[in-house]
Amino acid sequence: MLRAEGIIIDVPSWNDTYEPVIGLEVHAQLLTRSKAFCGCSTQFGTGPNTNVCPVCLGLPGALPVLNRKVVDFTIRMGLATRCTIAPRAIFARKNYFYPDLPKGYQISQYESPICSNGYVELESEQGRRRIGITRIHMEEDAGKSIHDADADTLVDVNRCGVPLMEIVSEPDLRSPREASLYMKKMRQLVTYLGICDGNMEEGSLRCDANVSVRRKGETTFGTKTEVKNMNSFRFVERALEYEIHRQIDLLERGEPVVQQTLLWDSTAGEVRPMRSKEEAHDYRYFPEPDLVPVMVDDPWVEEIRASLPELPDERLNRFVREYQLPQYDAGVLADEKDLADYYEQTARSLKSTNAESYKLASNWTMGDVLRVINEQQIAARDLPVSPAALAGMIDLVVDGTISSKIAKEVFDEMLRTGEGAVQVVERKGLVQMSDRTALEKIVDEVLERNRGQVEQYVSGKKQVFGFFVGEMMKATKGKANPRIVNELLQEKLGARTK
Ligand SMILES: [Zn+2]
């Protein structure tokens, strides 16, 4: 199950007559330390044109040598998406001219990709859906053109030769929502597998979409367009919504859809055609003469299979089983590996190992922890409150030392100072008041001070009960044990009602 983002898509107006047909091509930058075919660093953010050598510049006589990790990582993704792993895969040259590509070609794969015929499953608005993976292949990135304020264009070739994996889906997606869910699934898988950082803003995970529409019930495909430049999940949905409406409008007016490449413009909220010179499609692929075929034998595949981590769906199911969490909680927690790890470490650090404590840890992780990491844009593992520290605080709630209300205050203080829960509670004197006799005295005082409200209660206005609870919390600075306060108030007010 995937977490719903904070956007609500209305039921599309094309639902009755038309059906969109969408396929995605996802590019993921692989987390290797060196480039695909040379020893240059892949580090992001270094000075322009500093991570380069004769190989990635394609200087005459330089020969590429394949980075084994690139193959390992691609096979990992192939296994996670139930692909067939080819025993023999070859590289191909994709030829085109562009200023950011000094070699004049990219090394890619064409006829013999390393992985093919897999699938992933999604929970979409149409139920459980299986989306086919046509192929996954390895390739290298190109450089970057920087258009500065003047008429000049500068070129940074640091990215030339940075390894990419391209995942091509079957045209199985039937709505922008499904496309976005599929993209989330891809992000989830590559981050769980540790092969890509999944950062869409920085471009380490990006996608292009092939889109067409057809009347419901038809089995042939309509003319498709390609939409590029959608660098967030939200933009994937919005760009596809836009393009589907555009195509339907054309068909309704009796005009043809023209096959073309379109760019999503997030500022204008529309897609527009790419300049035609950016759209040269004749790549004249041919086998790369400088690289031998990649031979993948069974022991290699089995070694990688054995090293695969637990994947998101398995983890979700295990969370339900092992920690007795509701399906919903397990889905939210397992969605991102980082958060799932945080939760699991918290749960394992708890002193009390029962369903109630596990659920409490889940509430805290889905609530305050998730809120803070979203606000501060940090990873859960970088939160100043460690899983062990959170578990320590939850233990104090479970054993009655502090109330849930006080726990909020303790958590904020832990976040601010990095202290443990016990230290915070001691320093600030936040131990819960559970002494019945002491609380009884305060109840009496509260009732005495608020005779008017007592009258109201006695004459049948039972909703003022909450007012007394509030007054008790005020009087004890939130430290009163709510269960005992409730009991005492019921007792005392009940006695006066008779
Ligand atoms: Zn290099």
Image: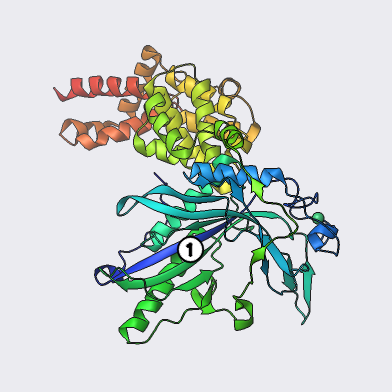
The residue nearer to you, when weighing 387 against 27, is 27
The residue nearer to you, when weighing 302 against 355, is 302
* Lateral position of residue 475 relative to residue 31, left or right: left
Q: Residue at x 43, y 59 (%)?
A: 170
Relative to residue 67, is residue 479 depicted above or below?
above
The residue nearer to you, when weighing 315 against 60, is 60
* Lateral position of residue 133 relative to residue 320, left or right: right
User: For the view shown, which residue lies furthest in the left direction?
Assistant: 498
Residue hosting label 1: 236
Relative to residue 294, is residue 414 depicted above or below?
above
Label 1 packing within 10 angstroms: few (<14), some (14-19), many (20+):
many
> Residue 29: percent from the left, percent from the top?
64, 53
Q: Residue at x 41, y 81 (%)?
A: 257
* Quadrant (top left/top right/bottom left/bottom right) for the N terminus: top left
> Residue 68: percent from the left, percent from the top?
70, 43
Q: Residue at x 47, y 29 (%)?
A: 406
Q: Residue at x 42, y 73 (%)?
A: 242
